[in-house]
Amino acid sequence: MRFYGLALLASAVVLGACGGGEKKPATDTAATAAPAPTSGAAAPAAPGAVAAIAATGATHEVKMIGDDKGYRFDPANLTIKSGDAVKFVMVSGGPHNVAFDPTTVPADSKAQLDANMSTKMSELSSPLLLNPNEAYTISFGGIKPGQYPFHCTPHLAMNMKGVITVQ
Ligand SMILES: [Cu+2]
């Protein structure tokens, strides 16, 4: 939202100053480059592509911890509503990440969850968080009710895992 606001402001300034902006927002360029749809109704998505859906509800925090008691997510099990977000915060003992096993994620929400993860190492797998207070937030917008088991890739063998239940 903030980016759109800034982009609009910047465009207005450019237009006002030069009377004809030469720089188009990246979204315009992408839209122009995309193949023209036949319907002309909604903005077209590439075949098979799923757009991220932003969270609209509460943000739940999960700590990523590694200390003399072991490696763990805290809480490891949490129940959220579809549309909430989960913010994973690196506390100690990193690197940690959050990864969903593509074989255990409910099939009808797999593509949406993958789209909602902004940067990734691979499908359904967040980048590594190295430093304390680094965070990675996942929107559960558009995610259907079900159980979403997750784990930390570097510490999977140390049982660093949990389950998000979406109601
Ligand atoms: Cu870990």
Image (tube, rainbow, N blue to C red):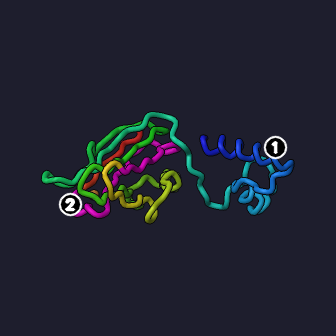
Residue 102 falls in which quadrant of the image? Answer: bottom left
- Report the amino acid beneath label 1: Gly
Residue in the image at 45% along x and 38% along y: 84
Q: Residues within 10 Å of mark 1 (few under 14, many from 20)?
A: few
**Vertical relation: 60 (above or below) 14:** above
**Dot 1 and dot 2 residues touching (CB under 8 Å):** no
**Callout 1: CB less than 8 Å from ligand 1:** no
Q: Which mark is residue 118?
A: none
Mark 1 = which residue?
A: 16
Q: Secondary structure at mark 1?
A: helix
Farthest left residue in view = 68
Q: Magenta span has 99? A: no
Residue 7 position within the rendered picture, expressed as x and y whole percent measured from the top left: 68, 46
What segment carries the magenta color? 134-159
Q: Nearer the viewer, residue 67 or 159?
A: 67
The earlier-in-sequence mark between 1 and 2 is: 1
Where does residue 12 sit, x and y in percent of width and height?
76, 43
> Which residue type carries mark 2?
Met
Q: Position of residue 83 (x, y in %)?
A: 49, 38
Circle 2 sits in a helix, a strand or a loop, which is it?
Answer: helix
Residue named by callout 2: 158
- Taking the image as shown, residue 52 lies to the left or right of residue 10, namely left
Residue 22 pos. (x, y %): 80, 56
Observer-nearest of 110 and 19: 19
In this rendering, the answer to whether 116 lies above or below 125 is above
Rendered image quadrant of residue 105: bottom left
Point out the frontmost of discs 1 and 2: 1
The residue that appears at 56% across and 45% down in the rendered structure is 53
In what quadrant does ligand 1 lie? bottom left
